[in-house]
Structures are given as C-alpha cells and as structure tokens.
Amino acid sequence: MQKLYTKPFEVRSRLDTLGLSEELLQQAARRGLAAAHTCTEHHPRPSAGYYLWSEAIAGLRETTALRGWHGEDDQNLPYTINESRTIRIAVATGDEYTGIEDRTPCTSSKKGPRTVTAVASNKRQYELFPGIELAPETLMNVIGSMGCTTWLLLIHRDIQTQEIRCELSRPVDMNAEGKVSDWAERIILASTPFTGPKSGVVPDVPKSPEIDVRIKRRA
C-alpha cells in the first residue's frame, strides 16, 4: 500500500529520517524554475525542460553538500547520494498530476535502462517490507547487497495555474510506455507560485538523460 505524506508535520518527519528538508528540495526546484524561465521562443523546443532538470540537479547537489551528500553519474543518469550511500535521488520532470495527493503521477518521459534497473531494485526491497517505513540505515542493514534505495524528485511546472509542484517519491514500477508510474511512498511538498506567460512557453518535456551512444565504424 502506498504511503502518502501531505501534512506539514508528516512531510517534515519523513524527510528528517532521510536526512533532508522540504526547503532544501524546494530550493533545488526553484533554481530549475529560474533556469527554465530564461528560455524564449528562440530556444529549441526542449530547452526549458532540460534547463529545469539540469539546474535542479545542480541545486540539489549544492544544497545537500553540507550534509555530506555528493553527485555521481550512473551511465549518464545523474544521482545525488548521501554520505552513507543508503539512498540516492534522481531528478525528473513529472506530469500534471505531480504534487496532487489524490492523483498518481508519472514521469513526463520514457526512462532508460538505468532507471529500469533502479526501479526494479526498489520493487524487490518494497516486496520484502510492504508498507513499512524504514530509515535508510536500517533498510541497508537488512537488505545488504540489494543496493541503496532510489528516490525521484518529481518537478512539474504548471503554466496555467502558475505554480511549480514537487514531490519526493520512491518508485516501484513502470508502465507499458516506459514511464515511472507506481510509488511506494510519496512525500508531497508545498507548491510554489510564480509569475510568467501562460502561453507560448516551451513545455517541460525533456527526453530521458540516459543516452545510449552507438558508434559504427566507417567502411
């Protein structure tokens, strides 16, 4: 059963067990939003989504560095990992249901093989302890070789409502389209309003950052 955290004290308590805070995550999202808003109609179509994703990752790594976290790339999939290597966070743009407690969000784009592997590992962990809330260190002590737990910081920039919605969620399954679609836990963060144009803005639809480069020898 999915665990949903929406009340401020629930959000604060659960994030504290992960060594995080709501403000820290929101700072990263706001940095991504500011980068997206630098785009104009002259930028390539995916630019706003890419800038949001890229700068949110940089912001997350900078704000968590003082807590001992650091950045790593797993074959073109960038993570932010805590000092004890028990949890790692990837940033992804989410669909319009991101940050809405009575709807289930998906990632806005199809994900690559590294995300598939991470979600499968999460699912194995979840099936061992369904519905049980474990601190990262406890989880690692019990699971051992199954690896650290992966979380997604989902960010959605809603042009119509003029707000950015975020959640930190633990994925456990993907749909037939290759998007992350099911979650063991969802920690809903407070939305952040912004001002800007409601139309003519490049949508947040960056492709998966997991890039497979195929090199073919020339004849």
Image (cartoon, rainbow, N blue to C red):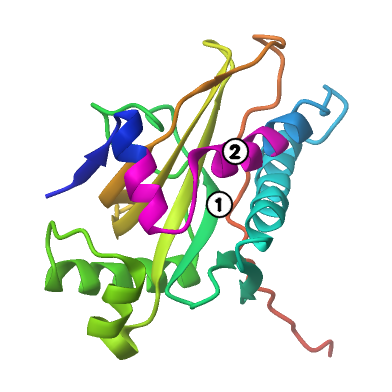
189 or 202, which is in the foreground?
Answer: 189
Judged left or right of residue 162, residue 58 is right
Q: Magenta: predominant secondary structure element? A: helix
What's the residue type where badge 1 is placed? Answer: Val
Tell me where residue 196 sits by quadrant.
top right
Rendering coords of residue 39 (x, y %): 82, 28
63 or 179, which is in the foreground?
Answer: 63
Tag count in the figure? 2
Q: Nearer the viewer, mark 1 or mark 2?
A: 1
Q: Which residue in the protein does label 2 denote?
A: 205
Tell me where residue 18 sits by quadrant.
bottom left
Quadrant occupied by the C terminus:
bottom right
Judged left or right of residue 120, residue 15 is right
Q: Which residue in the protein does label 1 denote?
A: 91
Judged left or right of residue 139, residue 200 is right
Query: Residue at position x 28%, y 84% from top?
Result: 141
Kindly tell me whether residue 122 is visible in this rendering: yes
Q: Are marks 1 and 2 in contact (CB under 8 Å)?
A: no
Is 13 contained in the magenta span?
yes
Boundaries of the magenta span: 12-31
Query: Residue at position x 83%, y 28% from top?
Result: 38
Please tell me whether residue 187 is drawn above or below residue 1 in the rendered image.
above
Query: Residue at position x 50%, y 60% from top?
Result: 89
Is 37 contained in the magenta span?
no
Indicate the secondary structure of the residue bearing disc 1: strand
Kindly tell me whether residue 179 is visible in this rendering: no
Query: Residue at position x 84%, y 32% from top?
Result: 43
Please tell me whether residue 192 is drawn above or below residue 198 in the rendered image.
below
